[in-house]
Amino acid sequence: MFKGIRGFFSSDLAIDLGTANTLIFVRDKGIVLNEPSVVAIRQEHGSRNNRSILAVGHEAKKMLGRTPGSIQAIRPMKDGVIADFTVTGEMLKFFIRRVHENRLFQPSPRIIICVPCGSTQVERRAIRESAIGAGAREVYLIEEPMAAAIGADLPIMDPTGSMVLDIGGGTSEVGVISLGGIVYSHSLRIAGDKMDEAVINYVRRKYGLLIGDATAEHVKKEIGTAWESSEVRELEIKGRHIADGVPRSQVVNSQEIHMALSECLSGIVTAIKIALEQTPPELGADIAEKGLVVTGGGALLRDMDRMLAEKTGLPIIITEDPLTCVVRGCGRALMESEKLSDVFVHE
Amino acid sequence: MERPASANDFTIGARLSKARVARGLSIDEVARSLKLSPRIVSALEEDAYDRLPGPTYVRGYLRGYALLLGLSAQQLIDGFNNLPQAAQRADMTAPAPVREASSSDTLMRFGTVLVAVIVFGLAALWWSGKDGSTRRRPAPVATAPSSSETPARAPEAAAEPEPAPVPETPAKAEPPVKPAERPAVAAAPAASPEAVATPPPLDPNAPRAHLTLRVSEDSWADVRDAQERRLLYETIPAGRVVNVEGAAPLSVFLGNVEGVSVEFNGQPYDALRHRRGLVARFTLGSSGGN
C-alpha cells in the first residue's frame, strides 16, 4: 500500500540471482553485494513449521554439509531456477535489506533480475513473485545472455553478430545477439555445479573417496583445467574412504581433474557448435571474425579459452572480471532502462 | 625487418610486433594460432583500434597474443586501458523505428484534422468572398466592355458560362443589353471591338489606357480600371490576343506571366519584372506606374 512512498526511499537494484552466487548492483553505487546463494535455516523443535533464517550468504556457505539435524543449509536455486520458493524469497529479502542497511523504511525498490534464457514461464513467474514477495515495487526480467553481453560491453545494438557464452553455476547460456535482440539462445544445465559433481564422482570412482561439494569446488578452482596439455598441478584432498569409512587424504593432479571435467566441457563445446550451426550465415561470419565472448565463473577455469579456441576454431575472449559480468549488464540495463527497455523479457 | 628503437616501441602494437619478430613468427602464423584473421593481427600491431571491433574484444585479443608471445598480458591490457579508445563504451541506443509519419500518431491525427479544418475554412471564406464580390460588383460580362477576342477563339469565349447575375446588376441602361451582345460577338467575329464597348468611365478626365495581351500559353488575367471595375477577369486560352481599354491606371494581375506579352498604349511592356513565382501584379498608366 505504501510501496510508492517506500519506493522513494529505496535504491533501484539489479540482481544476478545465480545458482552459486547472488550479486546485487545498486544504481549509482555499483556492485554492493556478492554472496553465495546459500541459506541456513534453523528448524525449531517446539512449535511446528517455525523456521527461522540462521544465516545467509558466506556465513551459510560455511555451514554447507556441516550442519546438525536442527539446521539446514540449502541452496534454494538449482539449475538457474528457483528450487525452493519460500527460501529464495527470504534470501532475496535478506539481501535487499542488507543493501538498504541504514534505512528507516522497509525498502521497496525497482528490481531487474536476470533469468536463464531457457527458463519456462512458470520459472520466470516464480522469480518475479519471489522478488515481489521480497518487497520489490516493480520487477523486470532480462535474459542472461543479453545481460552478459551488455555487461561485457558488446555492441549489441549494432547490426553485427555478437556471441556470448556464460558459464554460471547452474546453467551455461549461449546466445547470439544482433540489433538489440537475441537471434539464437540456448541454455544447458551443464555448468559449475555439474563440474563439481563430476569431480566428486571421479574421485569416488578412482580412489573410493567421498568428498563434499565444497572440496570438489576447491579442487576445480585450484587445479582444474580445461586443456589436457596444460601444466600439471597437484593438490591434496581429504575425504571419507568408502571401504574403510575413515577419513583419508589423497593427492590428485590436474590431468585427472581434466578427465573428470571432459564430459561437461564437451557438452559446452557441443552447445557452441549447435549454436553456430543455427546462426544465420552473416552473423556466423561476424562471430568468426570477432570471436566468442565468455563470461561467468566457468570462464575462470584454467585454459578454458585455449580449449574452446581449439575445439571451435573461434577466437575466444574471456571478459575482464567474468564473475560480475552479468550483474554489471543488469546494472547497465537499470541505469539506461529507457534505452534498453526492449531487452527486458515481456510476458 | 628489425627497426631501430624509438619512442614508437613503447606502444602496444610495437611491442607485440617486436616480440613476434624476435620469435621469428609471421603475421599469418600468429593469426592461425590465435584463430584471428591476419587483418586483425596487423591492426593490433599498428595500434589501429578503429579497425578492431571494440575494447572488450581488443583486450581479449591482446591477452591471447601476449600469452602466445610470452609477454605479460596484464601489462599490455593496462597499457591499452590507459588509451582513450579503451574507455569508449558500446552505444546501447536501440535502432529507432522510422515511424515519425505514422498515421496512428496522435500528433499526426491532430495535425491532419487541423489542416483539413484550415483548408475547409479557407475554401468557405473564398466561396463567400466570391459570392459577395459578384453580387457587389457589376457582372463580369458587363465589366469587360472593351475586350475583343480574336476570331478563332471567339466561340469558345462565348461558350464560357457567365450566367445570370445580370438581373441583379444595378439599373444602368447597359447591362440588360449585354447578354444579347455576347452571342453577337461569337456569331460575328468580325464585329469591331467598338461595337461591344460600353462607355463606363464615370470620370471623363481620367486618361484612357489601352492594353493588349498576347497570350502564348493559357493564362489567367484580371484587369481593373481606376474605379476598380473589372475590365477582364477570366482564363485566356493560348493563341488569343485580348485588347482592353479603360480608365488609367489599370491594375493588372496575370496568372501565368511567362505566357503573356503585354503592350500598353501600343508600347511593349515588360511584365516579367513584376513576376513573383508564376504570377505578376502591376499597375499601368499611373504616375510612376510604368
Image: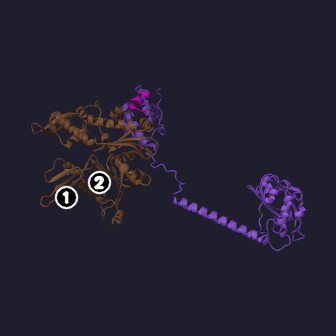
| Rendered location of residue A41, percent (x, y) | 19, 54
Q: Residue at x 80, y 51 (%)?
A: B216
Circle count: 2
> How dense is the environment of label 2, judged by Cα within 10 Å: few (below 14), some, or many (20 and up)?
many
Rendered hue of chain A is brown
The one of A60 and B145 positioned closer to us in this rendering: B145
Q: Residue at x 20, y 53 (%)?
A: A40
Residue A165 visible in the current orientation? yes
Q: Main secondary structure of the magenta part?
A: helix
Rendered hue of chain B is purple
**Circle 2 chain:** A
Mark 1 vs mark 2: in front: 2
**Above or below, comparing residue A218 to residue B176 in the picture:** above
* Quadrant position of residue B218: bottom right
The one of B109 and B178 positioned closer to us in this rendering: B178
Q: Is residue A214 left or right of residue B176?
A: left
In the rendered structure, which amino acid carries the disc numbered 2? Ala
**Above or below, comparing residue A290 to residue A76 in the picture:** above
For the magenta stretch, what is the residue range?
A: B28-36
**Above or below, comparing residue A326 to residue B69 in the picture:** below
Q: Earlier in the sequence, mark 1 or mark 2?
A: 1
| Rendered location of residue A54, percent (x, y) | 19, 56
In the rendered structure, which amino acid carries the disc numbered 1? Ser
Q: Which residue is the site of mark 2?
A: A126
* Quadrant position of residue B193: bottom right
Q: Which mark is residue A52?
A: 1
The one of A298 and B261 positioned closer to us in this rendering: B261
Q: Residue furthest left?
A: A244
User: Does residue A332 show up magenta in the picture?
Assistant: no
